[in-house]
């Protein structure tokens, strides 16, 4: 098989995100190998055939390269989710401790305290799951990363829902207007990033080889 035919067959089996970089590397490797065979006395056609044969079948190479890319994507997705989850501390902090007015009561109402604790607890669960996802992504259990990321995104969405209830309840007891413009975009950005990371890792899962 010529180098051109080999690359064309390989391109059809690789994910689109990997084609440009991977094909350039494979082309360079095959060209070097063919040059060595030609220097040893083979014809140009025989040299390319030997180089592609030595490199391995198209299916095997596509599977190996696709798996390597999927593992890299999975790890990047886990790191993205961790960063997004940690950054949720900003909307969590400003609601209600920073942007809301001072409470008019001498002692915090029980429901307000409970909502704060639940929101904080769910966020801490999301952070813990994000850390687990990063750790798992660097092990042989990396195929479980999407599941852990999805669980983290669900925990974060729960924290957001409870925070919304907290803000509504807080302002039902105070005369001020809720400052949604500050907290809402930050919270939404964190959630979208976490969900996107989970979906990205899930899309890469099928390309991971079993032993990873």
Image (cartoon, rainbow, N blue to C red):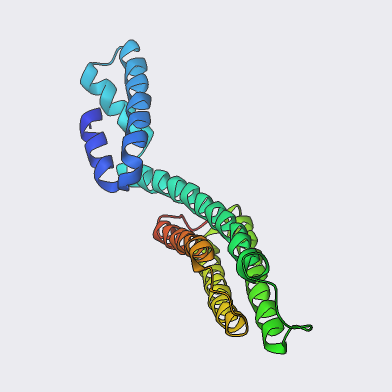
Is 14 rendered above or below residue 167?
above
Could you say where residue 144 lies in the image, as x and y percent from the top left?
Answer: 54, 65
Is 169 rendered above or below residue 54?
below
Image quarter in which the N terminus is found:
top left
Total numbered labels placed on residues in the image: 0
Q: Quadrant of residue 135?
A: bottom right
Q: Horizontal placement of 59 versus 146: left or right? A: left
Could you say where residue 174 lies in the image, as x and y percent from the top left?
Answer: 62, 81
* Depth check, front residue: 17 or 85: 85
Q: Residue at x 38, y 26 (%)?
A: 29
Q: Quadrant of residue 11?
A: top left
Q: Confirm whether residue 45 shows in the render.
A: yes
Is 11 rendered above or below residue 161?
above
Q: Confirm whether residue 212 shows in the render.
A: no
Q: Horizontal placement of 175 versus 97: left or right? A: left
Q: Residue at x 56, y 68 (%)?
A: 152
Q: Horizontal placement of 92 versus 206: left or right? A: right
* Depth check, front residue: 92 or 17: 92
Is 139 rendered above or below residue 144?
above
Q: Horizontal placement of 65 versus 149: left or right? A: left
Could you say where residue 196 lies in the image, as x and y percent from the top left?
Answer: 43, 60
């Amino acid at each position: 098989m010529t180098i051109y035919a080999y690359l064309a067959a390989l391109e059809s089996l690789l994910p689109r995100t990997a084609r440009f970089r991977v094909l350039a590397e494979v082309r360079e490797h095959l060209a070097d190998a063919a040059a060595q065979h030609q220097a040893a006395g083979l014809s140009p056609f025989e040299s390319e055939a030997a180089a592609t044969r030595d490199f391995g079948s198209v299916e095997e190479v596509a599977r190996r390269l696709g798996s390597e890319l999927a593992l890299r994507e999975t790890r990047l997705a886990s790191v993205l989710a961790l960063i997004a989850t940690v950054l949720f501390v900003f909307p969590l902090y400003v609601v209600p401790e920073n942007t809301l007015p001072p409470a008019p009561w001498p002692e915090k109402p029980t429901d307000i305290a409970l909502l704060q604790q639940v929101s904080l607890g769910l966020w801490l669960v999301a952070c813990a799951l994000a850390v687990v996802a990063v750790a798992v992504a660097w092990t042989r259990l990396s195929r479980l990363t999407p599941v852990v990321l999805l669980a983290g995104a669900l925990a974060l969405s729960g924290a957001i829902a409870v925070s919304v209830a907290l803000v509504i309840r807080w302002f039902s007891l105070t005369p001020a207007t809720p400052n949604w413009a500050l907290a809402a975009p930050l919270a939404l950005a964190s959630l979208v990033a976490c969900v996107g990371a989970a979906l990205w890792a899930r899309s890469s899962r099928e390309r991971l080889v079993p032993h990873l």
